[in-house]
Amino acid sequence: MIRRRTLSFAVLLVLALLAFAASGCGGDSSSESGSGSSGSSQGDDSTSDKGSGGSGDCADGVPIVADEVDGVKVSRFCGDASATVTVDGKDYQLTGGNCAQVTDKSFAISIGVAPSTAGGPEEDKEKFDFLSVVGGTTALATADTEPITKDGSYVDDGIVINTSVGGAASLVGTGAKLTLTDDRTKGTFEGAAIGGAKVSGSFDCG
C-alpha cells in the first residue's frame, strides 16, 4: 500500500540536515587525513574512499563517530549497511553505516561520511560521499504524516533522501518514495532531486 502525504519544503530540508548533524554522538577522535576508512564509493570505474564509513573508533559498536577530514568536521557512520545510489543513471557503491529508528514510528539509514555542521557550505557536502534517508513520524513531521513501522511502500510521509556522490549533492524532498522489505532491513528509494536529477537506489542494513 502506498501512502501519500506532503510536508513543507522547510520541514523536509531540516529533516535531511538533522539526519547527519550529530557530531557529538560519537567518539572524540579526529584525523586530519581521514585515514582508517574501510568502505568505498564507486561510480562506473572510478573509486574513492572519501565516502566510506567504518573507521577505527567504529569498533566500539557506536553507530556514529565524530571525525575531521581536511579541516571539515564530519560524522562517520559505522556498521555493515551498504547501498547502491544511482544519480542520473550512474551507479555509486557506498559501505559503512547503519539503519536506525529516529522514533518508534520512523525509519532512517545513514551510510558514509557527512559534514557534521547543518547548513554548512555546499562545497563541504560535495567533498564526501554519503547517503541519508529519513522517513515517518519524527519530531519535525506534520500532524498528518503516516508512521513507518512495517514493510511496504511509502510516498512522502516525511521521507527525505539526502546524498552526495561523485562530487555532487542531491536532496529529494516532496515526492520521495521509500520501499522497505525483509522486516525493514532492505529496501529501495527514489525521487526527483531539487535541480532535476533523478535519484534512486537500494540498501541493505547488513
Image: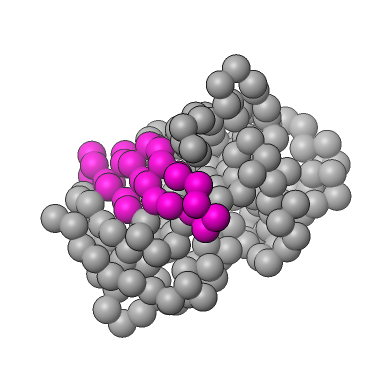
Q: Is residue 101 above or below residue 32?
A: below
107 sits to left or right of 5:
right
Number of on-image labels: 0
Q: Quadrant of residue 77?
A: top right
| Residue 140 to residue 120: above or below | below
* Residue at screen point 68% across, 51% down: 125
Q: Position of residue 172 (x, y in %)?
A: 47, 56
Closer-to-camera residue (57/4):
4
Q: Is residue 178 visible?
A: yes
Determine the residue located farthest toward the left in the rendered image.
1
Quarter of the C terminus within the rendering: top left
The image quadrant of residue 117 is: bottom right
Residue at the far front: name it: 196
> Position of 89 compared to 55: left or right?
left
- Seen in the picture, residue 201 relative to 123 is either above or below; the reply is above
Dominant SS type (magenta): strand
Q: What residue is rendered at 67% in x and 27% in y?
A: 48
* Vertical relation: 193 (above or below) 7: above
Is residue 189 highlighted in magenta? yes
Give the position of the N terminus as an image quadrant: bottom left
In the image, residue 139 lies in the stretch drawn in magenta: no
Q: Position of residue 116 (x, y in %)?
A: 68, 58
Question: Residue lying furthest top in this view?
Answer: 45
Q: Identify which residue is drawn at 58% across, 57% down.
A: 20
The boundaries of the magenta stretch are 177-203
Can residue 56 be seen by looking at this rendering? no
> Residue 150 location in percent, x, y?
21, 54
Residue drawn at the location 38% of the way across and 74% of the way down: 7
